[in-house]
Amino acid sequence: MEGEEFAVGCLLSIKTTLGDEFEGQIICYDRLSNILVLQEGLESGPRRNIRLLKANYIKEFSLLSQDEDPLDVKKCFLDLAGLQAREDSAIRQAEADSERFGVGVTSEAQTLFDALSKTLPVCWDKTVIVVMNDVRVSSPYLPESVRGGTPAANERVRKVLEFERKKIQTRGTSL
């Protein structure tokens, strides 16, 4: 399975050792890693399925035709606005995710934060857990450490803390 059969542009019908069957055009073949980069189907346009396939997993293949270079710059479509939007979205998500991690807090504090975040809006204010923008839970993150907010909100946060601390203690004694 080397040489001319893996030339860029070849359209192959492939059966893999895992039972997949598909047609794809070779975009690239890396001899060192023995990996084929294939564009599935012959659709042109803004979206294409690309498959990376280790050649060892090819059970059988047949050459359907030899087409032109699939990476012809004149026929490639790149949606820069779409790519920029995806990048912006990924950055916003990464920033939001990073705000969920406490800096300079214990793993127990992070576990309690994660438990509270499952049902309530929470964020960190340095090492203080802020729940529903009003209730503050300071180190050592005990039910008695809850301050601010309405009595009902306070009680709800205390109950979650008590429950999660019991779970942590149970896990600690079962180890």
Image (spheres, helix red, strand yellow):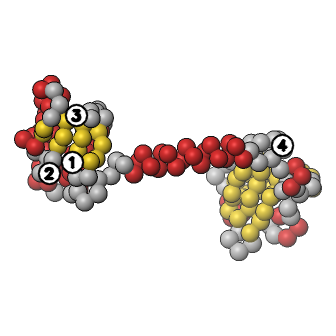
Q: Nearer the viewer, mark 2 or mark 4?
A: 2
The quarter of the rendered structure image containing the C terminus is bottom left
Few, some or many residues within 10 Å of mark 2 (<14, 14–19, 20+): few
Few, some or many residues within 10 Å of mark 3 (<14, 14–19, 20+): some
Residue 100 screen position, x and y as percent: 34, 47
Q: Residue at x 41, y 48 (%)?
A: 97
Disc 4 and disc 1 in contact, CB within 8 angstroms: no
Q: Earlier in the sequence, mark 4 or mark 3?
A: 4
- Can you tell which quarter of the image residue 143 is in? top left
Find disc 4 in the rendering and name its residue: 44
For the question of whether residue 127 can be seen, the reply is: yes
- 48 up-or-down from 67: above or below: above
The quarter of the rendered structure image containing the N terminus is bottom right
Q: Is residue 118 left or right of residue 36?
A: left
Find disc 2 in the rendering and name its residue: 139
Tag 2 secondary structure:
loop
Q: Nearer the viewer, mark 4 or mark 1?
A: 1
- The kind of residue tagged 3 is Asp
| Pick the front one: 111 or 98 | 98
Q: Residue at x 26, y 52 (%)?
A: 126
Find disc 1 in the rendering and name its residue: 128
- The kind of residue tagged 4 is Ser
Q: Which mark is residue 134?
A: 3
- The kind of residue tagged 2 is Ser
Q: Earlier in the sequence, mark 3 or mark 2?
A: 3
Tag 3 secondary structure:
loop
Q: Is residue 48 left or right of residue 66?
A: left
**Mark 4 and mark 1: Cα distance apart in space:** 53 Å
Few, some or many residues within 10 Å of mark 4 (<14, 14–19, 20+): few
Disc 1 and disc 2 in contact, CB within 8 angstroms: yes
